[in-house]
Image: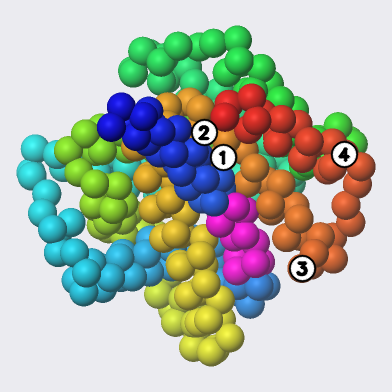
Amino acid sequence: MRNNKKETKPVKKYASYACILAAAACWGCIGLFNRPLLNAGIAPENLVVIRNLGGLAVLAFFFLCTDRSVFKMKAKHLPIFIATGIISVVLFTLCYFNAQKLCSLSVSAILLYTAPAMVVLMSALVFKEKITGKKLLALALALLGCALVTGVFTGGLSLTTKGMLFGLGAAFFYALYSIFAPFGLRHYSPLAVVFWTFVFAALGALFVADWGNLMTVLSVPQNALLAAGLVLLSTVAPYILYTKGLANVESGKASIMASIEPVVGTLVGTLVFGEPISAGVFLGLACILACVYILR
């Protein structure tokens, strides 16, 4: 019995790492769906609507059929899910899409990946997580890797003050999910936390919807399929996986490990959309894989 208990912890830990890495990979695939939808004329704000309302619809139907216990939530815990849903999910997405409008995709991505540093600092303050040398080294490698992958060092990148503020705002709200979600996990399962997060994310999305534009774009069957892929693969799946991972991994460590997202995004751009790939991308990939290895 004693041996079994000792074996359980590493298995649970590595399963949680796998969940976090899989979540980041799913988020990295978002360009498969976002880019064709944007090319089809959808308003960026409506991508928020598709992700949040679509995510809620999928989760509600799934839990209605499988586990209705997730629908129970105490009123005193409302602030937790308002925070994860509106502050984290809605405000992050709005800031990020605005950053992409105002500066290059590479700059937007590297600004977003200041988020792990924010999570490490906030986790130290809120959860008393230790800021170790190993964690700082992994953080530096992750940031360097993201910079190499997104081409920051090649020059010619566009940046405005407003764009920078939106990019850093996106990073801040993105980071807050790793801070708010653990409070929900103290009282509810990871699946319940994701469901209630999307209840409030969907409510927040209603205020930015352009229904005419949304209906016009989604009336084309191909676009409707892309929207379904966006909801299932790059919204519902990664939030469930990441939240499950947070149940057994420190917030700061989880956020750093999720830095593989831009690598996956770059590989998608190269393999699917024929974007050029440089030696810097491979070096960046090595840095990010090294950071994941350090944190194992």
The residue where tag 4 is placed is 280
Asked whether residue 161 is in view, the answer is no
What residue is drawn where x is 39% and y is 53%?
240
> Callout 4, which amino acid?
Gly
The 10 Å Cα crowd at callout 3, few under 14, some 14 to 19, many 20 or more, is: few
Of pointers 4 and 1, the one earlier in the residue sequence:
1
The reply, left or right, for residue 72 in relation to residue 124 is left
Q: Position of residue 38 (x, y in %)?
A: 62, 69
The residue range painted magenta reads 25-35
Relative image position of residue 177 (x, y in whole percent): 39, 38
Image point (14%, 64%), residue name = 68
Nearer-N-terminus badge (2/4): 2
Most extreme residue toward the left, as rendered? 75
Q: Which residue is mark 2?
A: 255
Judging by the rendered image, the residue that carries numbered circle 3 is 272
User: Residue 172, image x and y in percent?
Assistant: 48, 32
Q: Callout 3: helix, strand or loop? A: helix
> Mark 1 sits on what residue?
258
Say few, some or many: other residues with alpha carbon within 10 Å of mark 4 (under 14 / 14 to 19 / 20 or more): some
Identify whether 64 is placed above or below 295. Answer: below
Real-space Cα distance between discs 2 and 4? 23 Å
- The alpha-carbon separation of the residues under discs 4 and 1 comes to 19 Å
Which structural element holds mark 1?
helix
Relative to the observer, which residue lies in front, 219 or 283? Answer: 283
Q: Is residue 224 left or right of residue 30?
A: left
Q: Amino acid at mark 1?
A: Ala
Q: Is residue 54 above or below residue 221?
A: above
